[in-house]
Image (cartoon, grey):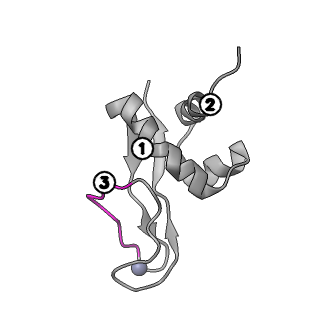
Amino acid sequence: MGLTLRQTMARLLEQREMSALDLAAALLLTAREVEEHLPHLRQSLKHRLKVSPARCRACGYVFGGRRRLDAPGRCPRCRQEMVDGPWFRVLG
Ligand SMILES: [Zn+2]
């Protein structure tokens, strides 16, 4: 029996930390599609889904205390659109 998409996402994240872009590349989805699954994944995994906050590549700003799981578009500090992450990991 095959795994559902979300189960596959969870398996990948048990092996290593990945961003929505990483997951999209691995699963042949768009980042937006991955981002639509992430809240459901968080709902089923609860605290096992560890989120490392997004970071601005230009100035190093860290998007701490953010509840949303999608990637921020623009850095509030330097206004650049060079944001990496957030990254996700499933703890055993
Ligand atoms: Zn910045």
Q: Amino acid at mark 2?
A: Thr
Residue 67 circle label: 3
Q: CA distance from mark 1 to mark 3?
A: 10 Å
**Dot 1 or dot 3, earlier in sequence:** 1
Main secondary structure of the magenta stretch: loop
Disc 1 within 8 angstroms of ligand 1 (CB):
no
The picture quadrant where one finds residue 45 is top left
Whole-number angstrom distance, CA of label 2 to CA of label 1: 15 Å
Q: Quadrant of the C terminus?
A: top left
Q: Which SS class for mark 3?
A: loop
- Against 3, residue 17 (above or below) is below
Dot placed on the residue nearer the N-terminal end, 2 or 1? 2
Name the residue carrying label 2.
8
Q: Is residue 73 above or below residue 9?
A: below
What amino acid is at disc 1?
Answer: Pro
Mark 2, secondary structure of its residue: helix
Q: Residue 14's x, y, as percent?
A: 53, 30
Residue at mark 3: C-beta within 8 A of ligand 1? no
In the image shown, does 5 or 21 lie closer to the viewer? Answer: 5
Q: Quadrant of ligand 1?
A: bottom left
Q: Residue at x 40, y 29 (%)?
A: 44
Q: How many marks?
A: 3
Which corner quadrant holds the N terminus? top right
Q: Which residue is mark 1?
A: 39
Q: Which residues are magenta?
A: 60-68
- Classed neighbour count for the residue bearing mark 2: other residues with Cα under 10 Å, few (<14), some (14–19), many (≥20): some
| Residue 40 is covered by the magenta coloring | no
Q: Are marks 3 and 2 in contact (CB under 8 Å)?
A: no
